[in-house]
Amino acid sequence: MLGQLGQVLDIGELVRRIVKYVVEGIMVAIAAYAIPKHSMKMDEVMLIALTAAATF
């Protein structure tokens, strides 16, 4: 069963996508923290970053 899962699931592609989404979330978090005139709370920044990473 695990052999069949390995044929269907490409671990390299999975890792590449996870890294891509994490980097996108970090970049959005930096923008959300740095761009506004009034600094946002860190939990708000993290929520925006998590939402961005989940939607891209």
Image (cartoon, rainbow, N blue to C red):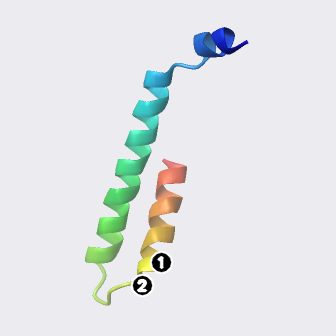
Q: Is residue 5 left or right of residue 52?
A: right
Quarter where residue 45 is shown: bottom left
Q: Amino acid at mark 1?
A: Glu
- Please give the label number shown on residue 24: none
Secondary structure of the residue carrying numbered label 1: helix
Asked if the residue at tag 2 contacts the one at tag 1, i.e. Cβ–Cβ closer than 8 Å, the answer is yes
Q: Name the spot of residue 8 as percent of width and height, x first.
A: 62, 14
Q: Residue at x 53, y 60 (%)?
A: 51
The residue closer to the viewer here, 41 or 3, is 3
Q: Residue at x 42, y 84 (%)?
A: 41
Secondary structure of the residue carrying numbered label 2: loop
Q: Residue furthest right?
A: 1
Q: Name the spot of residue 44 as percent of width and height, x first.
A: 48, 78
Name the residue carrying label 1.
44
Q: Name the spot of residue 46 as percent of width and height, x first.
A: 45, 69
Q: Amino acid at mark 2?
A: Lys
The quadrant the N terminus occupies is top right
Q: Residue furthest front?
A: 2
- Please give the label number shown on residue 41: 2
Q: Residue at x 43, y 46 (%)?
A: 21
The residue closer to the viewer here, 53 or 15, is 15
Q: Residue at x 35, y 49 (%)?
A: 23
Indicate whether 50 appears above or below 21: below
Indicate whether 35 appears above or below 26: below
